[in-house]
Image (cartoon, rainbow, N blue to C red):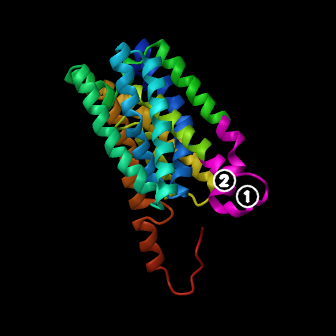
Amino acid sequence: MLALLDAWLLAPFDYGFMQRALVAGLALSLAAPPLGVFLMLRGMSLIGDAMAHAILPGVALGFLAAGFSLPLMSLGGILSGLLIAVLAGSVSQMTGHREDSAMASFFLISLAAGVMLVSLGGSSVDLTHVLFGSILAVDSTALVLIAGISSLIVVVLAMIFRALVVECLDPLFLRGQGVRGGVVHGIFLGLVVLNLTAGFQTLGTLMAVGLMMLPATTARFWSQRLEGLIAIAIGIALVASTGGLLLSYHLSLPSGPAIILLAGGGYVLSALFGRHHSLAARWCRHAAPLGAPEHD
């Protein structure tokens, strides 16, 4: 039994590429889910997906300039994501349109422009790598960059945590304390862009948002407290990252989709059997006798 567990759980990580992939996945799993929780609480879940595609033109320009140079592609992705965020915010303020509508419009433009740029400068293999990533191909340079960005996100998020919570619940109170909500919002969007830029090398621009949003939405079925949501989301992301790598190794599956599908499986199971708002919870509440006490 122990030999079987060793062969399935530990032996795959004897290889250097699996070790680097594991560290990269764990780093992203610590930084991405808290951002996803705040996106969910702010009603901005789909904006996270839009921002994931907003970095694509910058990544494509970096690829055209220097090939698979991760630092240059990451820099391009950061600048592109921040530019799209500023443009969407500016259009929203000048026209009165909702920010999510403006972001969705720029997301479509960014996606088409990025795919066009990569297609013009490379092969279908290059396009697949940029869109879907390859966590098993993470080298030492990429690992340092991913770990550095993830650490920066965690530190900055801890520094603005209280202001971010208040900005979600009561923006007027935050303004009364002399803190501009727009500044907090801008810093938060910047962290989202940084996280997606760190994630594109491992999961690709199309799925980098998955490790940020799926654990967060899954946690909503198990906790109603912010601290619980963040802790559970991080735990789910850690399990999905590690389990997805093991599945990809043993079953010869693509690693990125395996990680995201494992997180998606957790979401489906939680929607069915979770403690709060799931089908099972609703059935138990309706089946309980009238006047029976409800448990949180």
Residue type pointed to by label 1: Arg
Label pair 2/1, CB-CB below 8 angstroms: yes
- Judging depth in this view, the residue of 178 and 202 nearest the camera is 178
The answer to whether any part of residue 32 appears in the image is yes
Asked if residue 81 is positioned above or below residue 93 in the image, the reply reads: above
In the rendered view of the protein, which quadrant contains the C terminus?
Answer: bottom right
The answer to whether any part of residue 238 appears in the image is no
- Judging depth in this view, the residue of 50 and 141 nearest the camera is 50
How crowded pointer 2 is (Cα within 10 Å; few <14, some 14-19, many 20+) is rated as many
The label on residue 181 is 2
Residue type pointed to by label 2: Gly
Rendering coords of residue 192 (x, y %) = 52, 40
Which segment did they paint magenta? 156-185
Asked if residue 258 is positioned above or below residue 175 in the image, the reply reads: above
- Which residue occupies 41% across, 15% down? 69
Task: Tell me the residue that label 1 is attached to.
Answer: 175
Q: Is 178 placed left or right of 286 in the picture?
A: right
Quadrant for residue 118, please give it: top left
Q: CA distance from mark 2 to mark 1?
A: 7 Å
- Which residue occupies 65% across, 47% down? 184
Rendering coords of residue 156 (x, y %) = 66, 36
- Which residue occupies 32% across, 39% down? 111
Q: Which residue of the protein is positioned furthest toward the left in this rendering? A: 124
Rendering coords of residue 210 (x, y %) = 40, 42
- Which residue occupies 48% across, 29% down? 198
Q: Is 162 placed left or right of 96 in the picture?
A: right
Question: Is 69 one of the magenta-colored residues?
Answer: no
SS at circle 2: helix
